[in-house]
Image (cartoon, helix red, strand yellow):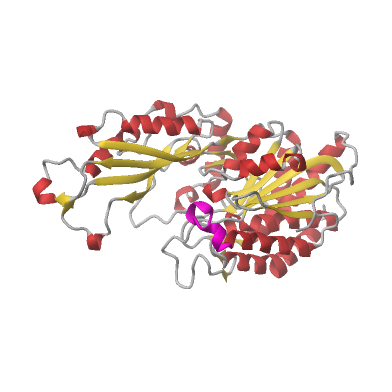
Amino acid sequence: MDTDAARQLIERSWESSILPALERYIAIPAKSPAFDAEWQQHGHLERVVALAAEWVHAQRIDGLRLEIVRLPDRTPVLLLEVPGAINDTVLLYGHLDKQPEMSGWGDGLGPWTPVRRGDRLYGRGGADDGYAVFAAVTAIRALRAQRLPHARCIVLIETCEESGSFDLPFYIDHLRERIGSPSLVVALDSGCGNYEQLWCTTSLRGIAAGALRVRVLDEGVHSGDAGGIVPSSFRIARQLLERLEDAATGAIRPSEFHVEIPAERVAQAHAAAQVLGSLLHERFPFAAGTTPVTHDGAELVLNRTWRPVLEVTGADGLPALRSAGNVLRPETTLKLSLRLPPTLDAATATRRIGEILCADPPYGAELSFDGDAAAQGWNAPATAGWLDEALSSASRDWFGRDAVAMGEGGTIPFMAMLGARFPAAHFVITGVLGPGANAHGPNEFLHVPTAKRLTGAVAQVLAAQAREGAAAGSPSRQSGQRPMPFS
């Protein structure tokens, strides 16, 4: 690859075409169905898929076939197929649905207000991960511009990822013949430890989430009258949480929620900690005086990638302060989110949380746990030698520094699904969510230079994969693939 020529093409595409499209995308409140029960009536998910399809069609890539796939009562999927020069398939993945608004955006910023300030494009969804379809297609364009061979590329863009991708298995089954058996999966929905290197995600945590409900009364009563007689539902909830979490350290108590961390991942954690140093914790907006749980960098990496961690993400039964009278409340409901080690079975973990919390109710209180979200984690297979070399070369050529491998603390259900469906495939999981990008929170931004460089790095990896396929004797195939009509 002529990296200078590719860099010029990618720079032009981003500045003249992609960024204007992303600004239009950010302005659409395309919340994931978990946060917008009336998503079908609102039509925002359809709007962002149509926007992306319009942009892709305008790129005029020879042979590209595009379809917006719609299964009844399920969120739409954008499917692209680009024929290749070798008998192989690469699957590139991203999503267009978004997290909800969140409060606390800075002056002049907002979730649906695209704002470009220097290297940053602010607004919900640009980095997580509306940029993915634009980067994937531009990477293919960069190869085509230099007549470099690549495998057949399937680009799959869903609109349910932020809700746990519950619609995606139905589309994977529906599109099984069209997708085929990819030997390489490239997902652009992950993070990066800094903006100076190519970061490859080697594991993702799972999640077990649900609502713990503690009920002690049929109605609220005067706290002065009942306090000391009726047990507090909040105090009981605190007791129950102690069964899961040591409040003093944050450690998850039951051993069944822990796994033995592979030696390779421990070594990667130490290497990543050396690269990042204090940036591991300084990138978070700590309140004045607050410190991280430890200053040992490797332990911080392992804590966020391979160890279970509990967070209370919401509550019901607690009135706002301005309307909180002196009442002993009848019940407390807490939304719990337990991040799980990558290899732990999420469904089993969710069931065990309910069993642990609801056993032996203190004071005979009415307890329930509604496990409403379980998503499996993922641990990458061993990286092939050619892919390791391709990633290192791409990072040096596009970022000027070596690539780094590290696990991520979040969950991408698609990866576990694809890992099980295509056990022989190689995986490149990467993204642009670096320091301060704040996905899901206020002031989320896309770091534009990183997105441009990542586009080039993906193109270079696709070229390397084609060379590997050709060296292995894959016959040329430009035709004979099932076409997909434009729609």
Q: Is residue 392 left or right of residue 214?
A: right
Magenta residue check for 403: no
Residue appearing at x 39%, y 46% in the figure: 292
Q: What stretch is highlighted in magenta?
A: 30-43
Residue appearing at x 61%, y 56% in the figure: 96
Q: From the viewer's side, name the closer residue of 202 and 368.
A: 368
Q: Where is residue 373 in the image (x, y as percent from the top left)?
A: 47, 41
Q: In this view, does 251 lie above or below 283?
A: above
When asked about the image quadrant of residue 165, the answer is: top right
When asked about the image quadrant of residue 379, the answer is: top right
Q: Is residue 365 above or below residue 35?
A: above
Q: From the viewer's side, name the closer residue of 432 and 352.
A: 352
Magenta residue check for 36: yes
Q: In this view, does 365 lie to the left or right of 389?
A: left
Q: Where is residue 387 in the image (x, y as percent from the top left)?
A: 73, 39
Q: Where is residue 249 in the image (x, y as percent from the top left)?
A: 33, 38
Asked whether residue 105 appears in the rendered view, the answer is yes
Count numbered badges in the picture.
Answer: 0
Q: Is residue 48 left or right of residue 233?
A: right
Residue appearing at x 53%, y 67% in the figure: 112
Q: In this view, does 381 lie above or below 397?
A: above
Quarter in which the C terminus is drawn = bottom right
